[in-house]
């Protein structure tokens, strides 16, 4: 593992005399002018450089710690000690000399104290660190860039405590995102249609697979639910049968999704497990590896793991567990490219225990059963951290393994966390949304800019939302840090990100929709170069609205925003340095997911809306408000980029109608051979008045659940070919019956040759794609469970 955070050799890309000459010329008569500080493309508002006697001074402790040094202040001696494994530097304020490993040296400009901080010349700091220094004349900013190869590591467990201590007063914080998750081009493509005889999972990028709960290899259908992976023979469709079942023995393992590697004849089941530990160190979990996970590795009472079980499918009738991979932390996301698996987890750090315990807790834990049944842990000195502000008491663990070559699981750990993941075939990007408070925020309660005096009296925190982006290079058996950057605003989901010709594109929203002053919401698209430095942007789209969906397609980007109506923006991304808006279409409703049909047509899946009056206490209309109603499908013609148009649209049901597709793109099936698309939907219909007595749109009652199958004509639009359901007519009105109906909800749709297969938790139904006649059904032997109110509550909350 690479460990050079303490190797401090001068690597100044631009000679310092050249770097600061423009600065010195301009500040001779204006020594109090502001200078911004950036570290690896991240703005450091809490670190304020000072210009004094034509020299830039920076706070020693703040910058040194971020660069991988430890700083100690000896109050009695009024001496600062900056140390690493190779250097020990002692310096005092207002003295022109200092020592390096006992050897005397001199300052060209003397350090001094200001507000209990030691201020040192930036030029001096550069001679003792491996950092690139650049001066940006246009923005009047100093940039400190640590090369990718020199990403700092924790020098010790004490260093970890120092970082955690800093986070207590950090002006930064991680910002949790909502549950909304949610081109036909060389970068992104519909892979729901494999272009062959069977469908594959609908993924964002061609050649980059995403895990799901249902897969097929053209011969068998695989479905993961509860603790079992069911394998069904699909052909002939009128003779479907269950041929194999893999049962997960470890009841502490909660499987989420899986990959299917048809060439290797393997399934990779991914989920979370939780290992509990007694106070005497014995493991009380039920995992096969539990007995070996002693207190020497896990001193905590419980640990969350991401687990991948590799199942051999060579004998389809007898699937066998052959390998288990475990990585500490909660599952974030994963990708599979060819035969290589990449995992990302968030590991919570128990800050209280770390700070209070006198001993050293072990580092991140992982296990690869093909190499050892014993869990391993990384040394803290192997854990890296990103230059810049630290705000997250978490570790982000990333791992890679090549399942074909059988190489050992390789793990990297970083202080930080991840939320959304985008992957091309060469790189993986992890994005995390954060909040940066203003440097000198006071308790003043500023105006929100609204007309409501109650809202206007609310305290609104001052600062900005931004997104930190971490880039990793993907090898067949390894994942390595490749850089970081940031953009203002927060992203919606993985489709807000894209890579094209080496450039990274990202769409964000800043501000809040309910504000009407300068802090109202605005939308932006940024282009970053391979070093994740911003080179182009389109900013301030649709003020007062937020992004609902994004799709990048080669040299074009499509962005949907919404508040009252749905503007679809078409952006030209051909020139990374100068992206621009080409056209805009405003229509009622909005799209939660955009899917490319071909190079000239785009399909939007979302909600229809109705605009109703807002009245004051006297009944006078003072405004209007848009409310969502039924599900809307729209076909857009974007052949004329400057004048996109809606070819056709379909509205399904009324308010409350819901489809998993609106937050999970994997629920969509596209079949180019038959020009059809299919998706599951729960249809709600209002029996009486559409608007209630209080002026709000009424919620409907459930009337149908199943798959809607549409034929697509790019010139004419959509034609409903059939509806398929697994529900039984006349279910009783009680919770137990509601649960059984939930088990019959169609969740996935796939095809093999000319047969359409719909899958619920209890049944697979085969339908002929030529005339849409029923071919046959097979029941899935899922163990009966008592009604769980949490299941229905979760589904209803998504409506």
Image: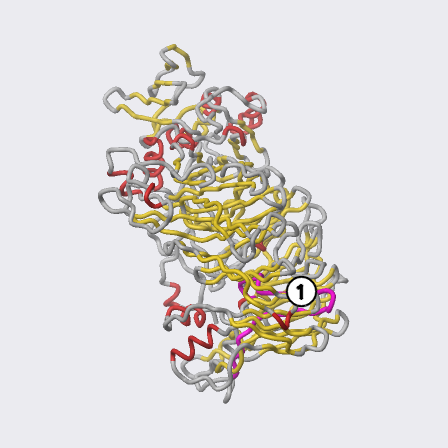
Q: Secondary structure at mark 1?
A: strand
From this view, report whether residue 512 is shown above or below residue 764.
Answer: above
Residue at 25% x, 47% y is 278
Q: Is residue 612 visible?
A: no
The structure's colour scheme is secondary structure
Expressed as whole percent of the image width and height from the top left, the position of residue 767 reads 64, 74
Q: Is residue 38 visible?
A: yes
Residue at 51% x, 20% y is 10
From this view, report whether residue 695 is shown above or below residue 93.
Answer: below
The residue where tag 1 is placed is 752
Expressed as whole percent of the image width and height from the top left, the position of residue 174 reads 42, 49
Q: As drawn, is 192 to the left or to the right of 53?
A: right
Expressed as whole percent of the image width and height from the top left, the position of residue 400 reads 52, 41
Expressed as whole percent of the image width and height from the top left, the position of residue 569 reads 65, 61
Residue at 46% x, 45% y is 324
In the image as oriented, which residue stretches furthest toward the top?
Answer: 103
Q: Magenta segment range?
A: 661-685
From this view, report whether residue 257 is shown above or below residue 426.
Answer: below
Task: Depth check: give the residue in front, 670 or 178.
Answer: 670
Magenta span has 720? no
Task: Depth check: give the residue in front, 354 or 734.
Answer: 734
Q: As drawn, is 282 to the left or to the right of 380?
A: left
From this view, report whether residue 427 is shown above or below residue 679.
Answer: above
Magenta span has 679? yes
């Amino acid at each position: 593992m690479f460990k050079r955070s303490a190797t401090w050799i001068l690597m100044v890309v631009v000679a310092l005399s050249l770097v600061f000459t423009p600065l010195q010329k301009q500040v001779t008569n204006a020594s109090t002018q502001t200078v911004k500080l950036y570290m690896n493309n991240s703005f450091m508002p809490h670190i304020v450089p000072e210009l004094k006697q034509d020299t830039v001074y920076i706070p020693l402790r703040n910058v040194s710690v971020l660069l991988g040094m430890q700083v100690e202040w000896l109050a009695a001696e009024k001496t600062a000690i900056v140390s690493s494994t190779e250097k020990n530097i002692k310096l005092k304020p207002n003295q022109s000399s200092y020592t390096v490993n006992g050897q005397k040296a001199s300052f060209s400009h003397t350090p001094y104290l200001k507000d209990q901080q030691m201020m040192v010349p930036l030029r001096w700091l550069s001679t003792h660190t491996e950092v690139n220094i650049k001066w940006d004349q246009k923005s009047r900013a100093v940039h400190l860039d640590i090369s990718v190869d020199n990403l700092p590591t924790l020098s010790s467990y004490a260093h970890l405590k120092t970082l955690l201590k800093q986070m207590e007063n950090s002006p930064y914080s991680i910002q949790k995102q909502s549950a909304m998750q949610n081109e036909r081009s060389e970068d992104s493509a519909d892979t729901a249609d494999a272009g062959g005889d069977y469908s594959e999972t609908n993924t964002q990028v061609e050649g980059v697979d995403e895990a799901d709960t249902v897969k097929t290899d053209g011969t068998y259908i695989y479905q993961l639910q509860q603790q079992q992976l069911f394998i069904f023979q699909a052909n002939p469709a009128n003779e479907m049968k269950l041929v194999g079942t893999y049962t997960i023995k470890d009841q502490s393992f909660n499987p989420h999704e899986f990959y299917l590697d048809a060439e290797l004849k393997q399934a990779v089941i991914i989920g979370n497990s939780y290992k509990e530990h007694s106070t005497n160190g014995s493991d009380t979990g039920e995992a096969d590896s539990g007995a070996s996970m002693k207190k020497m590795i896990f001193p905590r009472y419980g640990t969350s793991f991401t687990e991948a079980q590799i199942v051999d499918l060579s004998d389809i009738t007898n699937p066998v567990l052959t390998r288990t991979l475990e990585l500490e932390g909660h599952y974030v996301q994963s990708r599979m490219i060819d035969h290589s698996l990449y995992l990302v987890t968030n590991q919570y750090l128990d800050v209280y225990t770390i700070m209070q315990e006198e001993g050293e807790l072990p580092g991140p834990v992982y296990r690869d059963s093909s190499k050892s049944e014993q869990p391993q842990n990384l040394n803290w000195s192997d854990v890296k951290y990103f230059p810049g502000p630290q705000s997250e008491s978490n570790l982000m663990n990333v791992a890679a393994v090549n399942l074909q070559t059988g190489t050992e699981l390789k793990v990297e750990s970083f202080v930080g966390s991840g939320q959304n993941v985008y992957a091309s075939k060469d790189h993986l990007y992890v994005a995390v949304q954060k909040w940066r408070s203003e440097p000198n925020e006071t308790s003043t309660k500023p105006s929100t800019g609204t007309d409501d005096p109650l809202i206007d009296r609310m305290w609104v925190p001052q600062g900005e939302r931004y997104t930190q982006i971490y880039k990793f290079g993907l090898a067949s058996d390894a994942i390595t840090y490749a850089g970081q950057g940031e953009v203002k605003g927060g992203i919606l989901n993985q489709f807000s990100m894209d890579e094209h010709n080496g450039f990274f594109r990202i769409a964000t929203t800043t501000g809040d929709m309910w504000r009407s002053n300068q802090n109202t919401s605005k939308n932006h698209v940024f282009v970053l170069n391979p070093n994740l430095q911003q080179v182009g942007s389109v900013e301030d789209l649709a003020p007062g609205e937020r992004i609902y969906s994004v799709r990048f397609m080669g040299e074009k980007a499509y962005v949907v925003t919404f508040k009252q109506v749905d503007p679809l923006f078409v952006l030209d991304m051909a020139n990374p340095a100068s992206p621009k808006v080409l056209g805009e279409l405003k229509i009622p409703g909005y799209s939660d997911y955009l899917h490319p049909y071909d190079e000239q047509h785009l399909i939007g899946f979302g909600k229809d809306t109705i605009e109703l009056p807002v009245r004051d206490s006297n009944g006078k209309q003072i405004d209007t408000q848009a409310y969502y109603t039924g599900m809307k499908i729209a076909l857009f013609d974007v052949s004329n980029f400057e004048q996109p148009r809606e070819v056709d649209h379909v509205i399904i049901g009324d308010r409350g109608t819901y489809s998993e597709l609106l937050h999970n793109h994997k629920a969509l099936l596209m079949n180019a051979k038959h020009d059809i698309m299919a998706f599951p939907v729960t249809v709600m219909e209002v029996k009486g008045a559409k608007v209630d007595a209080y002026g709000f749109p009424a919620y409907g009652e459930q009337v149908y659940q199943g798959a809607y199958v549409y034929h697509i004509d790019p010139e004419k639009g959509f034609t409903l070919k059939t509806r398929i359901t697994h529900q039984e007519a006349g279910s009783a009105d009680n919770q137990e019956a509601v649960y059984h109906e939930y088990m019959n909800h169609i969740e996935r749709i796939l095809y093999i040759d000319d047969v359409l297969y719909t899958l619920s938790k209890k049944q697979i139904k085969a339908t002929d794609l030529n005339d849409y006649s029923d071919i046959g059904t097979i029941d899935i032997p899922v163990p009966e469970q008592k009604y769980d109110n949490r299941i229905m509550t979760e589904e209803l909350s998504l409506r």
